[in-house]
Amino acid sequence: MFEIVDLGLPRKKFLLGIAIVVGLMSAGILGFEFLSGNHTFRPGYTVAGITSILCCFLLYKSRYKEAVYLSSFLFAVALGLGVVYGPGVKNAAVWFPVLVFFQLYFFNRKMAVFAMFYCLGLIFWKTGFSIGLTGNEIYTDSIVSLCVLTLFAVLIGANIDKLILDKDVLLRELSHRVRNNMQVILEMVSFLKDSEDSMETRNVLQILERRIMALASVHTVSQDAEHIQSVSIGEVIENYLNRIVSKYKALPNLDPIAKHYQLDVKEANLLLLVLGEIVSATSESVTNHVEDLKISFRNPTVKTLELQVEGASLVEGDWSRFSRDLLSHSGGVLKVDPSGTGKVSASFVTLKR
């Protein structure tokens, strides 16, 4: 019931925007009423302003779930204080539908219904169950409209969940077929490579095989991922490296923090293709060793992801030309440190979250 939904939508950005708007609105209302001499006690807006500050801080620290739980709880507290100590339940009742939709968007339908009963409890507690009497008609209308709105919200949420589920089923089936087709292609390329006498042709087929493996690894991991459209960098890289460097003593070192990055399938394909070229060039070098490589990631900007590989003193060649051309289609660049420190970096623009 209290599980936070995550459907690949940019909810973190939306929550940050909501927190900023609510913070500015709360500060503006409190400041305007103070300057105008209207010293009305506004506990709800006071709590809302504090909540926005705490929420922005948690989001800055990449603690999205904590920010959602805190915002949900303090939002309910702010409404309760507004009803009990504010200028009137009529003003606070305007925010009841907002609480319902907040719970529906960031949690689930059960939380939306729970929020509805919470709001109804506040109304009944404030009015002393005197609904229907003369002068309380607005409370009756508020209760009916809140119940109908919650019903519509639950139905809309159910329909959206059904559409998302159908889409995920179709995407998984498509990914499954793509993976099977790639496996067939890999077997054909492997057969041609083993039956070819020309060393030059065998080398070309080996390069083709390695690049198809990169794409196949992404689709293999995405099949078991929670969301078919995004994959974990750590799982994808480990799956791919186990395929192409199994003949070496050890795998390259992957930064533990980097394992938690989530990428779109298209971005993961691009990353693995470039990484495969770097690892292959390292294995063909006499002075470099695959097990000495250190793989890490960083975000120079919000929309840019940079792959960094250290421990290999590589020179420009076919691998760098292919990688640079590949990255150029996504607005990325490849940098090879000419000083001999053994650092290669590839950055590209990520898709909008």
Image (cartoon, helix red, strand yellow):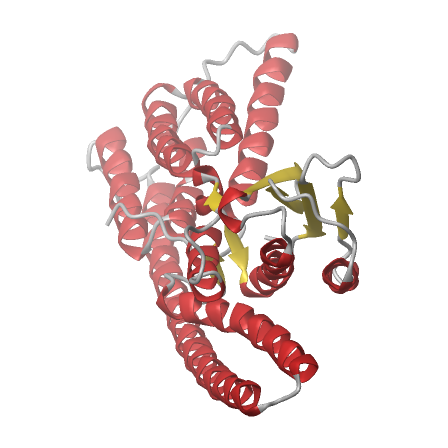
* Residue at x 41% of width, y 56% of height: 235
Q: In terms of image quadrants, where is residue 318? A: bottom right
x then y, percent, for residue 168: 42, 73
Above or below, comparing residue 57 to residue 141 in the picture:
above
Task: Out of 134 and 276, give the one closest to the viewer.
Answer: 276
**Residue 246 in sight in this render:** yes
Q: Outermost residue, left direction? A: 129
Question: Which residue is depicted at the point 47% across and 44% down?
Answer: 254
Q: Is residue 324 left or right of residue 196?
A: right
How many badges with numbers are in the image?
0
Residue 209 lies in quadrant: bottom right
Residue 248 drawn above or below residue 94: below
Q: Position of residue 21 (x, y in %)?
A: 60, 33
Q: Is residue 31 above or below residue 318?
A: above
Query: Would residue 57 be found to the left or right of residue 328 on screen?
Result: left
Tell me where residue 47 appears, x and y as whole percent.
Answer: 43, 21
The residue located at (48%, 39%) in the rendering is 255
Q: Position of residue 127 (x, y in %)?
A: 26, 32
Q: Is residue 133 visible?
A: no
Up the image or down, 258 lies above or below 31; here it is below
